[in-house]
Image (cartoon, helix red, strand yellow):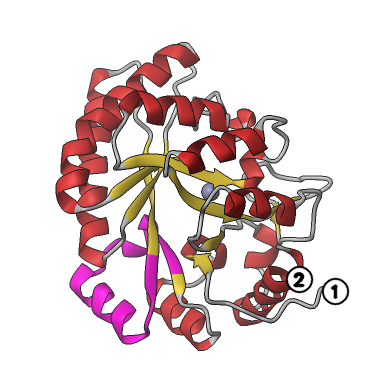
């Protein structure tokens, strides 16, 4: 145990972390638990009146850290690339409506073409939606995903690739998201975190843990301290790079989703103060 004082002022929970809850339950329960940062996943906004959601967030003193997620730009099919643009433009409208200052991009990949081609289409896609993002006041964060997802979820797999792309696009509205789950293994991580920090492009920080063994590569993520990631070390690098934003708990876990979500929220708080 550490002697850290319990400070939850920079704690954010992703709605997907407590997947059994809809948006209203997330807002009410997080707020009751003293957690006032929330990242909203778009699935909980389906069939919701966004004005009502915004009012709910305000009533419970919730600060929206980001909207998850946009992206999925690449495809060998033109029609799918175009529908991805439409979907991202819609995400920007949703973000603006609920007061989210940032959209996290899971950039996408299409295994029927090269990773280089997918990356070209990602850059094209971001450039296409950038004017709308800027005029809505919504930033975009490129989130590198672990290379195990390179075939179908993201052709951006290292922080270096994300930084390269953000620098190529070169807009104050485009930066990167650092997620320890995807990046902990990378021996250039410390220097790449310093790189995006020095350019004010480090927009988001996501935490969870890498379970040993990992049973399912999507939905078996650990609570901080369950696995092998040195989260405090990476958090230190992120803070040294000038990041002063929220620490976002993003855990996809069939194991924890099957438990009482209020008790789980207390476990998250404990893991946050003692093992993050
Ligand atoms: Zn993430």
Q: Nearer the viewer, residue 76 or 138?
A: 138
Residue 107 visible, this orientation = yes
| Secondary element at tag 2 | helix
Please count the marks in the image: 2
Classify 10 Å Cα crowding around label 1: few (below 14), some (14-19), many (20 and above).
Answer: few
Residue 127: percent from the left, percent from the top?
Answer: 25, 29
| Residue 176 appears left or right of 252 | left
Whether ligand 1 has any atom under 8 Å from the Cβ at mark 1 is answered as no
Q: Which mark is residue 1?
A: 1
Q: Is residue 71 above or below residue 21?
A: above
Q: Locate the N terminus and report the quarter of the image it occupies.
A: bottom right
Residue at the image position 31 percent from the left and 86 percent from the top: 59
| Residue 88 appears left or right of 187 | left
Q: Nearer the viewer, residue 101 or 75?
A: 101
| Residue 213 appears left or right of 84 | right
| Residue 241 appears left or right of 226 | left
**CA–CA distance between discs 1 and 2?**
6 Å
The residues colored magenta run 38-64
Residue at the image position 75 percent from the left and 65 percent from the top: 275
| Secondary element at tag 1 | loop
Asked if residue 5 lies in the magenta stretch, the reply is no
User: Which residue was labeled with disc 2?
Assistant: 274
Q: Is residue 27 above or below residue 257?
A: below
* Image quadrant in which you'd find residue 247: bottom right
Residue 165: percent from the left, percent from the top?
Answer: 41, 26
Residue at the image position 26 percent from the left and 41 percent from the top: 88
Residue 226: percent from the left, percent from the top?
Answer: 79, 59
Residue at the image position 25 percent from the left and 42 percent from the top: 87
Classify 10 Å Cα crowding around label 2: few (below 14), some (14-19), many (20 and above).
Answer: some
Q: Are marks 1 and 2 in contact (CB under 8 Å)?
A: yes
Residue 214: percent from the left, percent from the top?
Answer: 77, 45
């Amino acid at each position: 145990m550490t002697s850290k004082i319990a400070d939850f002022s920079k704690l954010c929970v992703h709605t997907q972390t407590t997947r059994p809850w809809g948006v209203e339950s997330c807002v009410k329960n997080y707020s009751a638990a003293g957690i006032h940062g929330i990242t909203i996943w778009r699935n909980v906004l389906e069939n919701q009146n966004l004005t009502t959601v915004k009012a709910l967030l305000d009533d419970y003193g919730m600060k929206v850290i980001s909207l998850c997620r946009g992206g999925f730009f690449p495809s060998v099919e033109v029609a799918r690339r175009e529908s991805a643009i439409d979907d991202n433009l819609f995400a920007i409208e949703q973000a603006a409506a609920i007061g989210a200052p940032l959209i996290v991009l899971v950039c996408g990949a299409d295994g029927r073409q090269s990773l280089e081609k997918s990356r070209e289409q990602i850059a094209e896609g971001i450039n296409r939606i950038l004017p709308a993002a800027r005029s809505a006041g919504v930033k975009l964060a490129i989130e590198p995903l672990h290379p195990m997802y390179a075939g179908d979820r993201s052709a951006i797999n290292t922080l270096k690739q994300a930084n390269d792309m953000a620098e190529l696009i070169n807009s104050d509205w485009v930066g990167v998201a650092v997620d320890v789950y995807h990046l902990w293994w990378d021996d250039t991580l410390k220097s790449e975190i310093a790189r995006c920090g020095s350019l004010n492009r480090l927009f988001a920080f996501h935490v969870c843990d890498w379970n040993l063994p990992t049973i399912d590569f999507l939905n078996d993520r650990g609570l901080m301290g369950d696995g092998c990631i040195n989260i405090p070390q990476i958090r230190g690098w992120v803070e040294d790079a000038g990041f002063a934003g929220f620490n976002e708990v993003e855990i996809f876990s069939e194991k924890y989703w099957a438990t009482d979500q209020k008790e789980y929220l207390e476990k998250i708080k404990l893991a946050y103060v003692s093992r993050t």
